[in-house]
Amino acid sequence: MAFKEYGNYDGIGLADLVRKKQVSATELLDEAIARTARVDPQINAVVVKHYDDAKRQIDKGLADGPFTGVPFLLKDLELLEGTRTTFGASIYKNNVANHSGTLAQRFLDAGLAIFGKTSSPEFGLMPTTESRLFGPTRNPWNLAHSSGGSSGGAAAAVAARILPVAHASDGGGSIRIPASASGVFGLKPTRARTPLGPDRGEGWGGFSCGHVVSISVRDSAAMLDAIHGPETSSPYVAPQPERPFLEEVGRDPGRLRIAFTDKSPYGDAIDPEIAAATREIAALLAGLGHHVEERAPVLAADPAVVMSTIVAANTALTVRLAEQLFGRAMTSDDFEVLTLASAHNAQKATSTDYVAAQLAAFQISRALATFFERCDVLLCPTLCSPPLRIGELNTMSEDLSHIAPILRRYMPATAMFNMSGQPAMSVPLAWNAAGLPLGMMFSARFGDEATLFRLAAQLEQARPWKGKLPPVCA
């Protein structure tokens, strides 16, 4: 191993060692590559490897930033000029990006050495990462289970300690779901906090945003400091933070008014171990001095209906653009059955249906805003059942009727905060009797990541998770 103590540090810690010249960026990259070779054959998280590009970045000179010299992985939905970006789709298996996304460039400007890309389900459509192109990404805590999705490769790579922090994105829960399933920290920022250009101003009708999953809270905060802010093409901007997010880590959160629920927003029963864990964390919060009461928002519309309409329309455009690029109709040889079915459903809907979905999303947002007038934070389970087993969701099945009921049971509460644009985080605070992680989700008012970072740091001290390592670990 190039650097034996690598696994003891988070990203900020590694960057500090590079800054003090106690270790070189090349040594860190070599260690990350060695760790990938050690565990990735079991978990299948790093599906695009461009090690030589990372070495050239280092030789050329990395940008001077808060993470200079730290190895990093992009999710395989983000463009990085000159590297393969597949979006998890067979039709794009040899696609090489001719430009970089704004977010990728900001990661480079932070000094990160990007050495590959992590797996995603096709176009990030599923809460599990099992694309036909690359096969399933497995959970380091139990290889029979999914690491979550759509940022499943990123979460698995961080959980297995290939690296301490990795790019992730979230349109309906895709940072928080894999963070929960894989036992790492993941915060979805406020809408428009991070850029989506240069090719688009927003994703999935404003639901989607990019950030990271990480081992430490401070890495998440420091990374958001490095990448947040509007770009020239931003259609709207998030509220300016009062101070750097990193300065919130360790700051006294005060006595927060925390509402909690151990129930699905649909009223369905949830896994009993998850319900018990939620109540245990509520008690922990009360013991830390917060005002805790059991209370849940009542939603004015069904988030699942909103998501299916908005996402289907965006997927239909993705298929149309591919047909224009390749000059032929797309088939199941090109895209998974689920992708084509979603696009087909959008063709059956009308423009009025789309506007109705937008209106329903607004109604959900208003209900949540009203709810947060009486509390600072809402605690609920990130997922309402343990991590899915590999194969439980089959996107190549001719009969896709099994998918919607599983999604309703598994992840009923994540998408509402994409609709409202509020920040929400999954914190690795519990594990079930089988040893699988059970993340707890905390959400706050629009623009108030500061409260979440302060609370997360307090919980990180009260119930540390960094030392909990999965069976598959580099």
Image (spheres, helix red, strand yellow):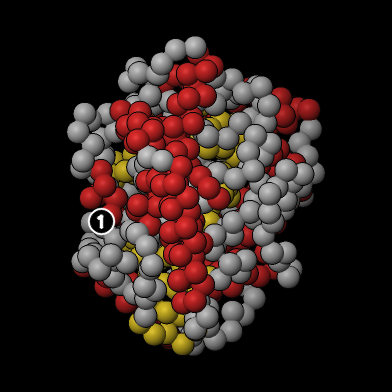
In the rendering, at what x and y percent does residue 325 appear?
54, 16
In the rendering, at what x and y percent does residue 160 appear?
43, 44
Quarter of the image for residue 124 reads: top left
At a point 38% along the width and 68% down the height, the residue shown is 299
Residue in front for this viewpoint, 92 or 286: 92
Q: Is residue 276 above or below residue 152?
A: below
State left or right for residue 314 relative to residue 58.
left
In the rendering, at what x and y percent does residue 85 appear?
54, 26
Classify mark 1: helix, strand or loop. Answer: helix
Residue in front for this viewpoint, 159 or 355: 355
Observer able to see residue 273: no
At a point 35% along the width and 52% down the height, the residue shown is 305
Q: Name the image quarter holding the N terminus.
A: top right
Observer able to see residue 349: yes
Q: Is residue 363 above or below residue 356?
A: below
Circle 1 is placed at which residue position? 409
Instruction: Inspect the image, locate mark 1, and give the three-letter code of the amino acid beneath it.
Output: Arg
